């Protein structure tokens, strides 16, 4: 059986970008979180989580991002979340007021510019 989500990591300019493809829900949120955290070295200024190819994000996925933000903040690292304006994922995060805690960006380039 194919996994619901896949995390693909790249490091343009030394900042990890974790692209989350597929669906994030209660069944796989812990695994997605672990994969993102594994991609962030201690010396990195932060991480960009790209939700552009994410097709579904439930409340556990939103909670994952809040947990990740708190953990990175304690390590003095930044979190930037990419989700295009007008997307269902952007609306979900805005309704959950995540945009008041974590900066949301329309593009990976904008997030990298703010973090790196």
Image: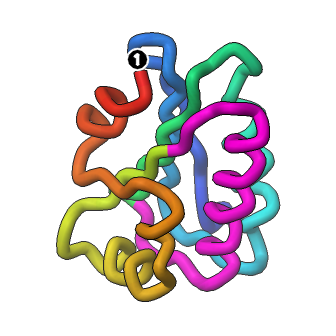
| Viewer-closest of 69 and 53 | 69
Is any part of residue 71 visible from this angle?
Answer: yes
Q: Residue at x 42, y 48 (%)?
A: 50
Q: Is residue 91 left or right of residue 101?
A: left
Q: Which residue is mark 1?
A: 12
The magenta span reads 54-79
| Viewer-closest of 81 and 115 | 115
Query: Which corner quadrant holds the C terminus?
Result: top left
Is any part of residue 35 visible from this angle?
Answer: no
Would residue 26 be counted in the magenta stretch?
Answer: no
| Viewer-closest of 7 and 70 | 70
Residue 77 position by quadrant: top right
Q: Secondary structure at mark 1?
A: helix
Considering only vertical position in the picture, is 28 above or below 56?
A: above
Considering only vertical position in the picture, is 110 above or below 98?
A: above
Q: Residue at x 72, y 20 (%)?
A: 41
Query: Predominant secondary structure in magenta?
Result: helix
Location of residue 17 in the rendering, given as x and y in whole percent from the top left corner: 49, 33
Q: Residue at x 43, y 64 (%)?
A: 54
Q: Residues within 10 Å of mark 1 (few under 14, many from 20)?
A: few
Location of residue 78 in the rendering, given as x and y in whole percent from the top left corner: 56, 37
């Amino acid at each position: 059986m194919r996994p619901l989500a896949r995390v693909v990591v790249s490091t343009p300019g030394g900042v990890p970008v974790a692209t989350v493809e597929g669906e994030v829900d209660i069944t796989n949120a812990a695994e997605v979180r672990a994969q993102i955290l594994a991609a962030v070295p201690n010396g990195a200024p932060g991480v960009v989580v790209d939700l552009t190819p994410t097709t579904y994000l439930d409340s556990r996925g939103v909670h994952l991002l809040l947990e990740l933000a708190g953990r990175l903040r304690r390590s003095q690292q930044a979190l930037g979340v990419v989700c295009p304006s007008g997307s269902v994922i952007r609306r979900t995060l805005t309704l959950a007021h995540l945009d008041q805690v974590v900066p949301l960006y329309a593009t990976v380039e904008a997030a990298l510019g703010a973090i790196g």
